[in-house]
Image (spheres, rainbow, N blue to C red):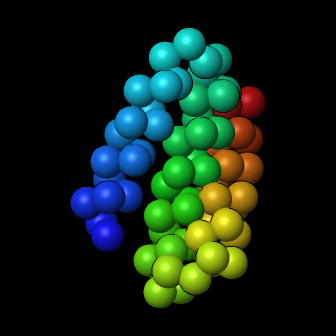
Amino acid sequence: MANACTLVTLIGLGACSGMSQQGQNTAIGAGAGAIGGAVLTGGSAAGTVGGAVVGGVIGHEISK
């Protein structure tokens, strides 16, 4: 599971090359939050989505 998450994250980060810095930080935060949420909640969908939302907001706000 962890290897699949890492692979998906790396592929997703490659798609960020044409994005603004704020967009990249939002995407990276959402990805990291999703992984963290999944790990902390044992893979529950709600934990994964919640982590992605929180991570995306934090990544977005860091850029300001």
* Depicted 44 relative to depicted 7: above or below: below
Q: Quadrant of the C terminus?
A: top right
In-image side of 52 versus 34 (left or right): right
* Depicted 2 relative to depicted 64: above or below: below
**Place of residue 14 in the rendered image (x, y in percent of width and height, measured from the top left):** 41, 26
Q: Is residue 62 visible?
A: no
* Depicted 25 relative to depicted 39: above or below: above
Q: Residue at x 63, y 76 (%)?
A: 45
In-image side of 43 versus 59 (left or right): left
In-image side of 46 versus 1 (left or right): right
**Place of residue 28 in the rendered image (x, y in percent of width and height, measured from the top left):** 53, 42
**Place of residue 41 in the rendered image (x, y in percent of width and height, measured from the top left):** 53, 85
**Place of residue 47 in the rendered image (x, y in percent of width and height, measured from the top left):** 63, 77
Residue 21 picture quarter: top right
Q: Residue at x 56, y 60 (%)?
A: 33
Q: Residue at x 59, y 70 (%)?
A: 48
Residue 24 picture quarter: top right
Q: Residue at x 52, y 24 (%)?
A: 16
Q: Quadrant of the N terminus?
A: bottom left
Q: Is residue 27 visible?
A: yes
Seen as rendered, the residue at the extreme left is 3
Q: Observer-nearest residue: 59 or 42?
A: 42
Q: How many marks?
A: 0
Seen as rendered, the residue at the extreme bottom is 42
Q: Observer-nearest residue: 57 or 5?
A: 5
